[in-house]
Each structure stands twice: as structure tokens, then as C-alpha cells.
Amino acid sequence: MKVLVVEDDSVLNETLLYNLQREGYNAQSAADAEHALRLFHSENPDLVLLDVMLPSRSGFELCRLIREKSQTPIIFLTAKADEDDRVAGLDLGADDYIVKPFSMKELMARVRTVMRRADPIPTEKRIQIDDLIIDLEAKQVTRHGDALSMTPKEFALLALLASHPGKAFTRDQLLDRVWGMNSYISPRTVDVHIRWLRQKIEPNEQTPSYILTVRGSGYRFRG
């Protein structure tokens, strides 16, 4: 998923890019509103992190311009902590408002939350790939017509991946979506559950055809 960072402080800009990329996002940045608008239209990001105090044109004005044509999620990053400023930002259509200084851990949690809210909810109740059937309503999985025994976490993990075919999820994103943001669980837990799922659904566990590994990042379901 793409994130556009609009921040004129070069140190903070680089720090944001580093942390976003480490989380598995495709992050790009701009230091002023004009460059940001060009990137926004050319790259079509999934989220914008937007500083309020920018040279030449304010973040509030940039937000207004974006909202004229797009509902892409926007999180304001600003040193302006006044209630009136927060209200103004939210009234313009921002999804969140974070006051500087902030911790990167909190920011990444806010990013995940906003992304999750913006993520379209799958409308299908039954997913079928070859002879594998995932019934999202009954919370049941069958293969070759035989019901597969699964724990609630295994089913939730499989349902999430299969509902977004081709989309890569990092381990942290899977932990967040399946186990919850406040769970203090090692990302390796995801690897263990993926291995269990592959043992149950893959025709050949050694060469998976459904749940694919995204090297250096996480996993995706076959598109």
C-alpha cells in the first residue's frame, strides 16, 4: 500500500519514510504542497501523512484540494495543538490529527487503524479457489468436499488473506488484524499459523499454491 508523506522538515521526513518502509508500505515524500499534489495525482496513494505548516500553501489548503476529488485517508501531523486547529482539520475531512512530537510506535498504530477503516469490507460470503471452499458466514473450510478442522485464529487468518487475493500483508499487519493491536505476541506466531494452514489446505506444503510468501515482508493469497 502506498503512503504519501508531506513534510518539510527533512529529518522528520526521512524518519517517517524509514519507519513506513520498515512496516512494509511503499512510501514517498514531498516537502511542499505543489510537489505533493503532483505525486498524489501520479501515484494515487492509499494514505497521506500531511504536515499543516508547509511553505507556500498550508496543509489545510492541500487537504481541501485533495477532498475535492478524492476520499483518500489523510492524517495531519502538526505542532498546532489548539482545539480549534484540530477541529478545523477534521472538518476539512482529515481522518486523524496527531500533534508533534509523537512516538513512531503510536503513529504506526494510527496508520494501521486508518488503513483498516478505509479497507473495503469483502461482500462475498463464500470464496472458492479450485477445490478449496471458504465459507465466511459459517466459518467453515472444505477441501475436496471434506471439512477441515481449524482454530478460530487459523480461520480468521485464512479468511483475511483469501478476502484480499494478491494483497501482501506484513507480519505486523496480520497480527494487528487477526490478534488485535494490543496483543503482545511475537510476529513469529504468524509464521507458525501459516505453516499450520499450509499443512491443511495446500496440495503440496513444500511448494504452496494458495498462501504465498512475500520475501522480506510477509504473506499474500494467490491472486
Image: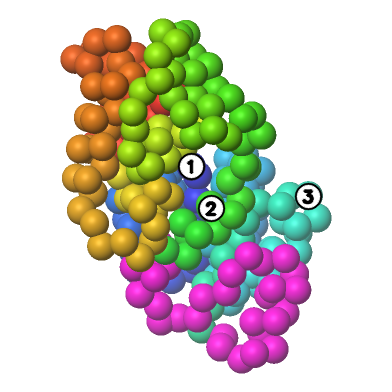
The secondary structure type at the circle numbered 3 is loop
Q: Please tell me which residue lies in front, 60 or 182.
A: 182
Above or below 140: residue 14: below
Sequence order check, earlier mark of 3 and 2 = 3
Sequence order check, earlier mark of 1 and 3 = 1
Q: Where does the magenta region start and end?
A: 80-108
| Mark in the foreground, 1 or 2 | 2
Above or below 91: residue 71: above
Q: Which residue is painted at 61% across and 51% down in the image?
A: 118
Q: Which residue is painted at 33% across and 58% down in the image?
A: 19
Residue 137 image position (x, y, % from top left): 58, 34
Residue 166 image position (x, y, % from top left): 47, 26
Measured Cα–Cα span from mark 3 to mark 2: 19 Å
Q: Which residue is mark 2?
A: 115
Q: Which residue is painted at 29% across and 21% down in the image?
A: 200
Kind of residue at disc 1: Met
